[in-house]
Image (cartoon, helix red, strand yellow):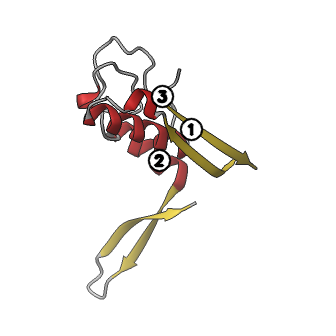
Amino acid sequence: GWVGINENIIMNERITSSVAKMNEYYLNNADFDHRRFTMCHEIGHGLGLPHTDENPYNTNLGDCLDYTDDPESNVLPGDVNMAKLRGMYLTTTKRRILRKDGTIVETTHLMRR
């Protein structure tokens, strides 16, 4: 059986609906870290994130999209997941401002795609 599952509806290359389901049959007696890992993992899929690794027996990568049998260090999204989300949903724009003293200030802004 499945511990968690996510069902996405995709239209025009965009996720229009996502339902994350947790299977209480398996999670009812699971410890807090395992429940947290499963929820983070399935919500990550709901946002469009792929697995970062599918081997549950190797060293944990420290993110919740990494399959693991020992979820203690994989209960949150990792830097790799956040970078992927920024690439999927945000774009950067640079803005340069010329100050009265002649210096140029450049700022980078993240904006929704």
Q: Find the residue positioned furthest to the right.
A: 12
Three-letter amino acid code at disc 3?
Answer: His
Q: What secondary structure is marked by label 2?
A: helix
| Residue identifier under label 2 | 85
Q: Is residue 95 left or right of residue 29?
A: right
Q: What secondary structure is marked by label 3?
A: loop
Vertical placement of 81 versus 103: above or below? above
How far across and how far down the image is residue 69, in percent?
33, 18
Quarter assignment of residue 113: bottom right
The label number, if any, that marks residue 6 in the structure image: 1
Three-letter amino acid code at disc 2?
Answer: Leu
Reading the chain from its start, which is encountered first: label 1 or label 3? 1
Three-letter amino acid code at disc 1?
Answer: Asn
Q: Residues within 10 Å of mark 3 (few under 14, many from 20)?
A: some
The label number, if any, that marks residue 49 in the structure image: none
Q: Closest to the observer: 101 or 94?
A: 94
Residue at position x 36%, y 80% from top? 98
Q: What secondary structure is marked by label 1?
A: strand
| Residue identifier under label 3 | 51
Distance from disc 1 to disc 3, alpha carbons, whole Å, reads 13 Å
Residue at position x 34%, y 36% from top? 35
Residue at position x 58%, y 46% from top? 19
